[in-house]
Image: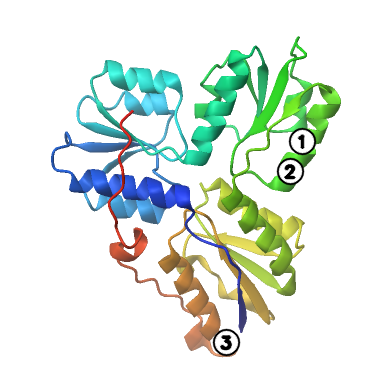
């Protein structure tokens, strides 16, 4: 089977930075224990499990404020997705040692929002409801930052001001975002547009749009919680117009997907370990639909292959 290895793929700089910060915290014996991560450090279960085996406790299943209520002592790490000022304040009030692993691209969006609010603007924020990145951004000022995800959300929005700025989550589909921004501009002609889709997301999406169409099928390796991974599968289906499947690792590939497929394209989300993607590529390389011995996928990966290499020292940002 021919495999098109789409690049760029895999870890972006924000993900590597966040993971290095966690590893540096683990190696720093002077930090208060236990070490908690408030949410998944990045949206990939393999990464979370690797840190769990190093003694880090990942809190999940609620808002950042709710998760923080579970911590009474020790060190807390804010994830790459960013947090609201209220969460930062609550951590300080609880006397916790706080480390900030917010992605620089996300922090830049927060700075933009704060600047526009300080100048008297209402901010329309395009993002996925329930995702931690919009939670942190909207939390800057829930009264004046308005989250929308769909055209229906936009229609239901009432803003009595001509000073409006529109920005967005960093990991959205660039095509969907552009369409919704156009609709915002029609509804609010004076709105200033600040498209904050990060470069890593744009490059990965554009590569899929450009190359996946040469294949019969696209496999995206990434976590179902990863918005950027989901958007890559969406781009393959809607822009490249080929079937696509999102898998967390090689064991989720079903041989019946590959019957009659001559060429398959492979990419991965910005929080997907390269070793996990490499096993997918190796499996597809050797797959023969006429030889059942090639059908059974096997996953074997060490934590040292999951976490960034080399594990260079990272500067810890105390919040």
Sequence-wise, which precedes: disc 3 or disc 1?
Answer: 1
Are there few (<14), some (14-19), or many (20+) residues within 10 Å of tag 1? Answer: some
Asked if the residues shown at circle 1 and circle 2 are in contact, with their CB atoms under 8 angstroms apart, the answer is yes
> Which residue ends up furthest to the top in the rendered image?
160
Residue at mark 1: 180
Colouring method of the image: rainbow
Which residue is at the front of the view, 2 or 198?
198
Residue drawn 69% across the image and 81% down it: 260
Q: Position of residue 309 (x, y in %)?
A: 34, 62
Compared to residue 260, the image places residue 199 above or below, namely above
Instruction: For marks 2 and 3, give the CA distance.
Output: 37 Å
- Quarter that holds the N terminus: bottom right
Are there few (<14), some (14-19), or many (20+) residues within 10 Å of tag 3? Answer: some
Residue at mark 3: 288
Instruction: For marks 3 and 1, give the CA distance.
Output: 43 Å
Are there few (<14), some (14-19), or many (20+) residues within 10 Å of tag 2? Answer: some
Instruction: For marks 1 and 2, give the CA distance.
Output: 6 Å
Residue at mark 2: 176
């Amino acid at each position: 089977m021919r495999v098109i290895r789409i690049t760029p793929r895999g870890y972006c700089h924000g993900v590597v930075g966040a993971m290095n910060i966690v590893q540096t915290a683990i190696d720093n014996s002077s930090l208060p224990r236990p070490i908690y991560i408030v949410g998944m450090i990045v949206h990939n279960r393999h990464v979370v499990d690797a840190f769990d085996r190093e003694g880090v406790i990942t809190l999940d299943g609620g808002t950042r404020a709710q998760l923080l209520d579970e911590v009474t002592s020790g060190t807390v790490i804010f994830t790459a997705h960013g947090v609201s000022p209220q969460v930062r304040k609550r951590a300080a009030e609880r006397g916790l040692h706080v480390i900030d692993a917010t992605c620089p691209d996300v922090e830049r969006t927060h700075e933009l929002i704060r600047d526009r609010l300080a100048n008297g603007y209402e901010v329309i924020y395009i993002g996925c409801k329930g995702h931690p990145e919009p939670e942190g951004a909207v939390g800057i000022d829930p009264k004046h930052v308005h989250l929308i995800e769909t055209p229906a959300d936009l229609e239901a929005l009432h803003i009595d001001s001509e000073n409006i700025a529109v920005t967005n989550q960093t990991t959205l589909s660039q095509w969907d975002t552009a369409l919704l921004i156009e609709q915002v501009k029609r509804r609010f002609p004076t709105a200033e547009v600040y498209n904050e889709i990060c470069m890593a997301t744009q490059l990965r999406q554009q590569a899929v749009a450009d190359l996946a169409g040469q294949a019969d099928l696209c496999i995206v390796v990434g976590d179902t919680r990863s918005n950027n991974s989901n958007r890559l599968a969406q781009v393959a289906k809607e822009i490249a117009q080929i079937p696509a499947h999102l898998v967390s690792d090689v064991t989720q590939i079903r041989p019946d997907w590959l019957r009659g497929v001559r060429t398959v394209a492979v990419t991965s989300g910005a929080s997907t370990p390269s070793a996990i993607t490499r096993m997918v590529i190796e499996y597809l390389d050797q797959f023969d639909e006429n030889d059942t011995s090639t059908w059974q996928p096997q996953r074997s990966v060490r934590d040292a292959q999951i976490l960034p290499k080399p594990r260079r020292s990272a500067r810890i940002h105390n919040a």
